[in-house]
Amino acid sequence: MNDVLKTLMDHRSYRKYSPRPVEPEKLQLMIRAAQAAPSWVNGQQVTIIAVTNKERKQQLSVLSGNQKHVADAPVFLVFCLDFYRAKLAGELEGQPFEAARDVDALLVGATDAGIALAYSTAAAESLGLGIIPIGGIRRNTAEVIELLQLPEYVFPVAGLCVGYPDEELPKKPRLPLEAVYHEERYHPDLKGHIVEYNTAFREYLGTVGLTERDWSATVAHFYALNPQYGDSGRTLPQQGFTCDNLKD
Ligand SMILES: Cc1cc2nc3c(=O)[nH]c(=O)nc-3n(C[C@H](O)[C@H](O)[C@H](O)COP(=O)(O)O)c2cc1C
């Protein structure tokens, strides 16, 4: 296995960080790696905002659902989907900007932001840093948009804690390959694979000292109780994503 694959396969998310600062050169490499990623029509629909100020990290920690690691990690990156530059391009070219009327814009922006986050993650891990993505950033997006002064057509997709880990963790097991990979067509008979994974997942929880619970119970509970995770239903239209051409 080459070094890139070793880095990718050795991933784990860390929730405890040492106060050791992240070297600016390493942070810059993470951002450059994100910028090197592919993007839809080369529109580069991503912006990354680095927050290192203690007070602002504390605010974001609370807004993300009181996640302590957001305040403790030396750097907190916010990955935003961003069509603001596309709108400016339209102004420069005397063209209207209509993309945000289409719900597909959200898929485009979220995909670009996700790829960028993955590239930054791989870069960080290859440099000896630890990370954890933070979807909690979408719990209170009205306040996050205000705090980060996001202009129209920009929306926070995920955060990323970055720092030197202060804990050792085993790797979290994944679903059997057959559950996530199909050849030629989708094969929906997957319950057996889920039941098989429940056993591996329970064992993992036991080794890290957590209450043993089936993966299916965890996921079912989350999606039964979180029909709407955050407030994006209100804030996306405020940021200009009207998505009003669904019937066209
Ligand atoms: C987009 C995204 C958002 C996430 N948000 C959170 C979060 O808000 N809080 C948290 O503790 N973990 C969060 N995670 C981490 C996942 O829980 C973690 O990746 C998963 O349990 C697998 O564990 P591993 O990354 O250690 O392999 C997030 C992961 C992703 C990809």
Image (tube, grey):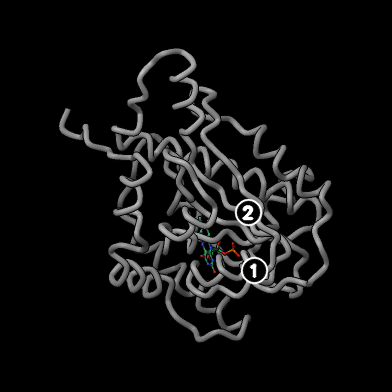
Give the quadrant of residue 143.
bottom left
Q: Residue at x 35, y 20 (%)?
A: 96
Residue picked out by circle 2: 77
Quarter of the picture containing the N terminus is top right
Whether the residue under disc 2 has CB within 8 Å of ligand 1: no
Answer with left or right where residue 125 lies relative to residue 155.
Answer: right
What amino acid type should be assigned to the residue bearing mark 2? Leu
Quarter of the picture containing the C terminus is top left
Answer with left or right where residue 166 lies relative to residue 218.
Answer: right
Q: Residue at x 55, y 65 (%)?
A: 60
Residue 198 percent coordinates (x, y)? 44, 72
Q: Residues within 10 Å of mark 1 (few under 14, many from 20)?
A: few
Which quadrant of the render holds ligand 1?
bottom right
Q: Residues within 10 Å of mark 2 (few under 14, many from 20)?
A: many
State the SS at label 2: strand
* Badge 1 or badge 2: first in the primary sequence: 1
In the rendered view, would you say 218 is above or below 60? below
Residue sitting farthest toward the top: 93
Residue closer to the observer: 76 or 203: 76
What amino acid type should be assigned to the residue bearing mark 1? Glu
Task: Tell me the distance, in whole angstroms, between the alpha carbons under discs 1 and 2.
Answer: 15 Å
Residue 159 percent coordinates (x, y)? 56, 56
Residue 82 percent coordinates (x, y)? 49, 38
State the SS at label 1: helix
Residue picked out by circle 1: 55
Q: Residue at x 42, y 40 (%)?
A: 152
